[in-house]
Every structure is written in structure tokens, then in C-alpha cells.
Amino acid sequence: MNSILYLAWRYLLWHRWKTAILVIAVTLVLYLPLGLQLVVQQTARDMTARADSSPLLLGSRGSPLELVLNALYFSAARPQSLEYGNLQLLRDTGLALPIPLYVRFHSQGFPIIGTSLDYFAFRGLELADGRQMVQLGEAIVGATVAQDLGLSPGDSVVSSPEGVFDLAGVYPLKMTVVGVLAPSYTQDDGAIFVDIKTAWVIQGLGHGHQDLNKPAASAAVLKKEGERIVANAALVQYNEITPENIHSFHFHGDNTANPVTAILPVPRDDKARVLLLGRYQSDNAVQMVQPRTIMDELLVTVFAIQAYVLVAMGLVSLATVAVVLLVFLLSLRARRAEREAMFRLGGSRNLIAALMLAEIFIVLVAATVVAALLTAATLMWGGPLLQAVVMH
Amino acid sequence: MNRLTLITAVLLAAACSPAEQPKSLASYAADSARLEIYTVNYPLAWMAAELVDDMAEVVFPAPGDVDPAFWQPDVDTVLAYQQADLVLLNGANYARWLAKVSLPMHKLVDTSSAYKERLLAIRASPVHSHGPAGKHSHGELAFTTWLDMDLARQQLQAIATALSQYLPHAQAEIMTRAAAVEQVLTRMDSQLSSLGQSLHSVPLLYSHPVYQYLQQRYQLNGKALHWEPDQEPGLDQWQVLDTLLQVHPARIMLWEAEPLPAVTAQLAQRGIRVVVFQPMGNRPLEGDFASLMAENIAGLERVAPR
């Protein structure tokens, strides 16, 4: 038996290119439907898990899907913002702990999430290094961000301008990294977290500048009319918040009119969740959505598309199997002289048949092993790899 | 958003692996056996301490020589606030450092939330303008709310309610204690109301603009200066006072602390009597909120017309 396998193995090695093509073809037939199924199932499971862990979302009226994808998965599509004052209204109901989310800005391709410390407690995010953010201008980075950008406490990240030609728009703000989160294997690993107030500073709603009453700022004073001081463009505005200048940072007016992209209410209990849904049902300005429901609707579409893809793959697999069979049959015909030579040398018909079957067996085993390895790799790295491909 | 984008977004989530479980509000409750309550000023610390006795630890970490309203805690102190089970806020934008730090919202209790409409606005700094935001001032709200005993009572109620939620087993005891403290505040409110009637037509001076709520509640007729008890006013400040006295002939001046003897003497020359009325934003060296407020009231009674 060993000699048959050895002869088959040597034959396949001699015809290595033909063997490789056969192994690849069979591997793909085995792996592709399985891999797709696994990726989609894993995706569905993970997405619904994150949606399940976020029972409600409050956002501005508009696409609920955009709201959910932005607030839970930090997607680039930004829903219309709503006023921060809604958070206090929600808190006043006593039905839920509201957590603000302002997902708008980026730094080196990673989303900057403006939120409160409650977010970390709610998601169960732990610090692996450093400390929690304390004051304006401090940032906590996710494990992936820290790894990809080589960040550790004490380093800095700079927010990206929203548009190259938007000279009057958002200025970059240099923020100090004070902590790195332990991996959570969620979207939080790829995010930069700042206090909601820091996000407003990035937007320019809060800022720090020279004290216009001090002589050092005299060059920046355009005119004084009683208690009113008008500054000119020479007024130095700070693009980094330091212990030396933090006292000069301020917000104009009440924060209640400042924007957030979503509010994540953590209901006191299930009854509170239902009550909140009812309260916001007829609100024309804001909407309360259940992320799980929205994701289920989306996944129905995904599964429908997956079914079409699987049917198409089935047809391609049939064609591939037919081609592989053809290759084997043509190979047998082409090797008639070889078989006759083996017969004359004393090889029985059974032995020769066994040799041919062994070759097919080895190809199938090799393809199965490669397909299994690919499936295992998909289970481990399918998501991140796909993410990397899409990001680039 | 087109469907392709949606599908991409779905597939992107493949990066996740462990399932997440929702957290309830109850899970945020303190793990430690003893509740730790942090406050931003002394009156709140006093009220909380009166309510919890030894059931919880009340911490007011500001150093004794600073005004907690303008104090800037260091990083370690803010981290301690973050670790507390409950943080009692005064509201009215008191403690400006709060606007520049991160604290967990679920631990914050704004004791002024019941009377937002009664907060008094002040203009504390010049109006200025730069950029597209238009003119603005960094002025704030008057914040010594506890000098209005009615507002102090409401702050006490807010603290009692919050503590009852955190210490449900001690709710009855907390409410009993709250009733006792409320009686003290109510008595002071009556005394100050009577004093307000006596002083209604008497022009007063305040060494600092911190008595807005006292004036509002008890119908006092005072004008505020910007004098410090431990500093001798400059010539220009005396001139401002003399000018003011021509239109506002005050004979009583309320001080946050005892002024320098020389200042007292010069005021006496102008016929002005000094009355120490401590706002007690910070912890007093001796006594507590109740005893010192009683002294404040007694001081006013001594100068009020019979």
C-alpha cells in the first residue's frame, strides 16, 4: 500500500503544476461556500450582539440605519445631529442613563468618539495602560489604534481637518493620549475616545485664547467699546490644551445647544425601555430606535444576497467538479501507454487502478486540508482581513 | 446610503468576536461596602454628612485656603472624584473646573435641578467678540445658592433623594434626618426673612459679589464691591466707595471674613459698620454650616434697626 501511495505521490510531484491547479480548484469548491457562510454568520452574530448590548438609540429624525451604523459601528456616514439638551431631558425622565455620542471627527483614519466616561463602564472597556481621561484635550485610544499608530500614554494624536479647502472650518486639535484600552474585539478597539467637550473643542464650539484684558493681547484688540472688546485675526487661539492654557478654554453659551450624533440611553429596566419608546414615538424632531430591530432588517437583506451568492457558487462548483473529472479522465486516456507498460512489467489491473485512485485521493486530501486551514483562518482573521481590504 | 455600502458596513463588523451583554443601571452601583460621596463645596458636604452620619464617607477635597468655586483640582483629585460613588454638584455653574474635566454622568447629582428658573445671571467679564461666533461674555450665573435658605432646602431634598436611591435600606433614616436638617434651615429662613423686613429700606454694601441669593430671597438693598478681607483697598477703591455712598448711603457692610483693622477703622470713619457674613463655600475652621449661619444671622440682627 505504501508503495502505491509513494508512486502516486511521485507522479503528482512530477506533474506539480497540474497537481497544484487541481488542488486549488477543489479547494475553492470546498472552501468558498463554507467561508462565506462562516463570515456572514459570524458577522450577523457579532452585529446583533453589539445591537443587543445597546437596547435603544436616540437620534435625529432620518435614516435609522445610518444612526445605528454610526453610533454602534462608527461608520463614516454621519446622521444629522441632535442637540445635547435632549440628553438632560432624557435624564430627567429618570428612566435611563443617557450616554452622549459624537462620531464625526477622525485622526489618521480612526474615528474620534466624543462621549462621557459612562461609555467605558457601559461597554465594559478596561484600561490596559495609563489612566482615564481627566481634562479637556485628553484621549483614550483603542487597542488597535495604539498598535497601528504605535501610541502609548504621553503620545499625541491630532484630529484631521474635515476638508482641505475648508479654511474657516475645523482646526486640528492636538490631544494627549493618557490611556490605552485593553482589546475588546469590538469596534471600540479601532476608536479614539475623548470627552464630549473635547469633541466640541475640535469643532470650534469651545476654544481657548489670549486674555483680551491683558497687555500681551493688546495687538489682537481691534477696538474697545465700553465692556465690549472686538478682537482681530491676530488673536492667538490655542490648538493644544495644556495645563498652562486650559484656564482660557471656554464654551460660548449653554452646552445644551451643542451637537451630538446620537444618545445611547441605558434603560433602568425593560419597562423603562418600553416607556421611552412610547414617549418618543410621536416626536417630530428626534427618533428612538431599537438597534436590534434595525440590524435584523439589514441582516434579512444580507442573508437574501448570501442565498443568491450561494446558488451562484453552487453552479460554479458543479462546473468545477465537471472540469476536474474531465481532467482526470483525459489524464487516464493520455496515460494508456503508461498503464500498458506497468501491466507488462507485472502489475495487476487492480494495482494499476489503485495507483490511479491514490493520485485522486491525495489531491482530494490535500485540497481538503488546505480548505480546512483557510476556514480556520477565516474564523480567526476573516473579519479583520476583510476590514483591512475594505479600508484600503 | 446605497445597499452596497450597507453590506460593506455589515461585513466590516466581522472584526468582532465575543458577544457583548447589556449592562443595567443597577450594575453601576457601588461595589464597595461604604458609599463614598464627593462634593464640590462645603454646604453640600455638610448637608450630606448630616444625612448619612456614618453610613457613608463624605469627602470635600478642596484645600482650606482656596475658594472652591475657582479651585482647579489636580489630576489625582479628579480621578478620586471619578472613583466616588456619588458626586454632589451645586449647579449654577459652580466650580468652573467641572466644565473642563471628565466625570461619569451617572454619578453626578445636580442639587439645583429643581430650581433652574430661580438661578440669577451675572455678568462677570467684559463682552468681547472674535471669529464668527459673535459677541459673547464669559460671565456666569451667581452661584452661592445656599445663602437662600429655601434653595438650600431644595438642595437638601435633592441630596436626600439621591442618597435614598443609593442606600435604599436606610431610606427611612435618611428622610428622618433630612426632616431635622430642614427644620434648621426653615428656622434660619424665617429669621432671615424677618431680618429682611427690617433691613428692606436700609442700604447695604457687600465686600464681594457673592450675596445675590441672600439679597434676592430676603429683599435686601445692597451693592457689591470687589474687596478682599486680607487686603487693604487701594485709593481708587476708596474713591469708588465714596462715589457710591453718595447715591447709596450704606451704613452696614457685609464681609466674607473679618477685614483688616485699618479697613474697619476707615469704614467706621464713614459711619459704616462691619458685619461678617460668611458664605462658607469652603469648610470653616471652627463650627459647621448651622452654627456659622446662626452667627451670620446674629451679626445681622445686631445691626438691624429695631
Image (tube, grey):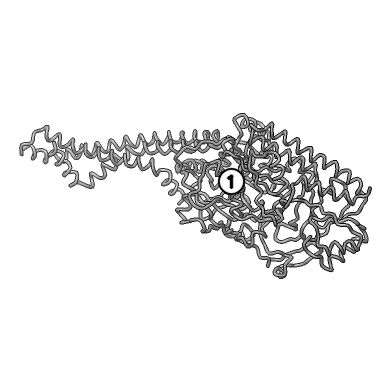
Residue B267: quarter of image = bottom right
Horizontal relation, residue A316 to residue B160: left or right: left
Horizontal relation, residue B213 to residue A287: left or right: right
Q: Position of residue A13 (x, y in %)?
A: 19, 46
Residue farthest to the top, as pictured: A271
- Is residue A275 depicted above or below B37 in this figure? above
Q: Position of residue B105 (x, y in %)?
A: 63, 44
Whether residue B107 is visible, yes or no, is no
Residue farthest to the front, as pictured: B286
Q: Nearer the viewer, residue B133 or B205?
A: B205
List the residue tagged with mark 1: B83
Q: How many marks?
A: 1
Q: Position of residue A263 (x, y in %)?
A: 61, 42
Mark 1 burial class by Cα count in 10 Å: few <14, some 14-19, many 20+: some
Mark 1 lies on a secondary structure that is helix
Amino acid type, mark 1:
Gln
Whether residue A46 is visible, yes or no, is yes
Q: Nearer the viewer, residue A312 or B209?
A: B209
The quadrant of the picture occupied by the N terminus of chain A is top left
Identified at 84% across, 68% down, the residue is B235
Horizontal relation, residue A284 to residue B198: left or right: left
Q: Nearer the viewer, residue A302 or A325?
A: A302
Residue A215: quarter of image = bottom right
The chain under label 1 reads B
Identified at 88% across, 46% down, the residue is B195
Q: Position of residue B290 (x, y in %)?
A: 77, 44
